[in-house]
Amino acid sequence: MEFILDAVLYLSQPLEAELGSFLSEGAKLLDKGAPKGQGAVLVNWLLEGDMLKLKIKSGTYVRPHDAVYRLRNYLAEKIGREYKTGIRSVKGVRYEISFMLEHEPKEKISIPFVKELNFEGKTCRILLLDLDEVFLRNNYVDRIISLIKEKVDEQAYAGKDEHHEITWSSPKKKHAGKIDPTEEMKKRGWIKHRGRGQWIYGPTATRIIKTMESIVEDKLLKSLGFTEVIIPKAVTWDVWKRSGHAKSIYNEIYYLSPPKSRDPAYWEEVVDLYRITGEIPLDKIKERMDYPIGGVSYAQCPPFWPLFSNKTLSLEQMPVTVFDRSGPSMRYESGGLHGIERVDEFHRIEVIWIGTYEQVKDLHQKIIDQYRLIFNDILDLEWRMAWVTPWFMAQEGLHGLADEKHVVGTVDFESYLPYKGSRKESEWLEFQNASNNGMKYPQGFNVKLSGGQQLYSGCTGIGLERWLASFLAQKGLDPEYWPKAFKKRVGVLPEEFILL
Ligand code: ATP
Ligand code: ZN
Ligand code: MG
C-alpha cells in the first residue's frame, strides 16, 4: 500500500515565518502508533501566503488523511501562540493511492469520488482530487478502498451459482395432477389479481392460509415457546443502514415518501385538477412529495432490532423467542412476477430467536425439526432442504459461498411443483428459509449480552403465499384429496361469492 497526499492548510492570515523547526517536530508525531519507522512521512512543505502546502506519504500505517490532522493540531497550537495565526481549514488537493487486491479484476469499475482508477494485475491505483474536510475526516478513503475490493470480489463470484447443497429430501409423493395453483384458484374465484403482483384472497384461499398459520402456531410457535410482537412495516433508512440492507436493496424497494406539507392549501391544485379532470395529477403529486424516509418492509426482522439497539440483554433471560405476523412485506419484483408464487406484496410469519451461540444453533435445529413434522405429517408435501449461500452474503455479491460446518447460514425449504416439469429438471419453489444469522444483527445494532459472551440470532420467514402454492400444486383444490390431518383442521370450506 502506498498513499501520497498533497494537502493545503489554509491559515487565518498570510504569514511569513520560518516554520521549519515546528514542522520537523510535528512530523515526529506521524510515527506514533506504527511500528518503528513505518508511520507517515512529511516529504516536503511550502509556506505561500495563507497556504501551507504539505506532501505526506505513508504505507499501511498512519494514513496521510489522518497524519495531516495530527500536523494540523500540532501546528495550530504552535503558530497560534507564536504568530497569532490560526488554521482555518484543510484541503486535500491530490491523493494518490495504490494497494493490492485479492483477485485480478475482470471488468472496469467506476467509483464515486475517484477521478482515475487503474489496475495493473492485482495492483489498483486511484487518484482523488479536491477533497474537503468531510471527505478526509470521515474516512471515505478507507471505505473507497474496501468498496473497490468488494466490487472486484463480486466480479470473481459473479459467474458462480448460489451455493446449493441438498441436505435432506422427503420421499417422492403421488400428486393430484399438474395444476398451476394460481390459474385453478382464479378459475374458481378464490383469488383475484389486483395491481402489480398483488392478489385479493377470498374466503376459501384465506381459510387455507389461516389454517396453515394455526398449524405453525400449534406445532412451532407454542411448542417452542415463542411470543408475538408487532414489528413496524414502514422501515426507515437508519434500520437498513444497520442491518446491512442499505448496501444493496434499492432496486427492489417500494419507497415511502411523506408529503412536503400537510397544509391543505399546498395540495389545493392537486385536488382541483382531480376534481376537474377525473385523473390523478401524478406529476403535481411528485413535486409535493418529500424524499423517501425508507421503504415498506423487505425482510421482516430488521425493524425489530431497534428495540434492543445499544443495550445489553440479560444472559438469564436468553433466548429471546418472538414472532411477527402484523402485515405484508413488499418487493418490487418487476418482470419476475409469477402467479402467487412471486408477488410484490406478500405475507409472512417471521420468527426470530436471539441468544448465545449454542442457543441459536440449537433453536435453529429444533425449528427445522418442527417444520419437518409439519410438512411430513400434516401437509404431506414432497419437499427438500438445501444449505445455501446465506442471504447476507448473497446480498453482498458473495455467491457460491457458505459455511462448511453448516452452522451460521441459511437452509432453504423447497417444494416440488409438478406443473413445472420433472423433478430433476424443473425449478423447485423456495417456500421459506431458516437462517442462523450469526453475529450480523447484534453487531449491526450494537446489542450485547451480559457476562460478555457474543450474541447470535436467527430468523425464519414463513412465506404463506408460497406454502399455499406448494400445497395446492401437489394436492389440488379438492379437499377430498387433501391429507386427513389438514382436512380436519380446515373444516368445511366457506362459500365463495356468486358473481352474476
Ligand atoms: P427468491 O429467490 O425466490 O426471490 P429470496 O431469496 O429473495 O427468494 P428471501 O429474501 O430469502 O427470498 O425471503 C424469505 C422468504 O420470503 C422466501 O422464502 C419466501 O417465502 C418469501 N418471499 C420472498 N420474496 C417473495 C415474493 N416476491 N413473493 C412471495 N414470497 C416471497
Ligand atoms: Zn429475518
Ligand atoms: Mg428475491
Image (cartoon, grey):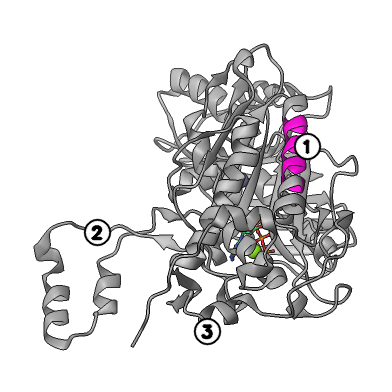
Q: Local crowd at mark 3 within 10 Å, few (<14), some, or many (≥20)?
A: few
Q: Nearer the viewer, mark 1 or mark 3?
A: 3
- Amino acid under disc 1: Gln
Residue 131, image x and y in percent? Answer: 55, 50
Question: The residue tagged with tag 2: helix, strand or loop?
Answer: loop
Q: Quadrant of ligand 1?
A: bottom right
- Name the residue that disc number 3 marks: 187
Q: Quadrant of the C terminus?
A: bottom left
Residue 34: mark in rendering: none
Element on which disc 3 rests = helix
Q: Is residue 202 left or right of residue 73?
A: left
Query: How far across and how far down the image is residue 379, in percent?
Result: 70, 56
Is residue 8 in sight in this rendering? Answer: no
Q: Pointer 1: what residue?
A: 365
- In this view, the residue in front, 75 or 346, is 346
* Number of disc labels: 3
Say which of 331 and 250 sits in front: 331
Q: Decide: is 328 above or below 236.
A: below
Magenta-tinted stretch? 360-372
**Left or right: residue 214 compared with residue 453:** left
Q: Assess mark 2: CB under 8 A from ligand 1? A: no
Mark 3 residue type:
Lys
Kind of residue at disc 2: Lys
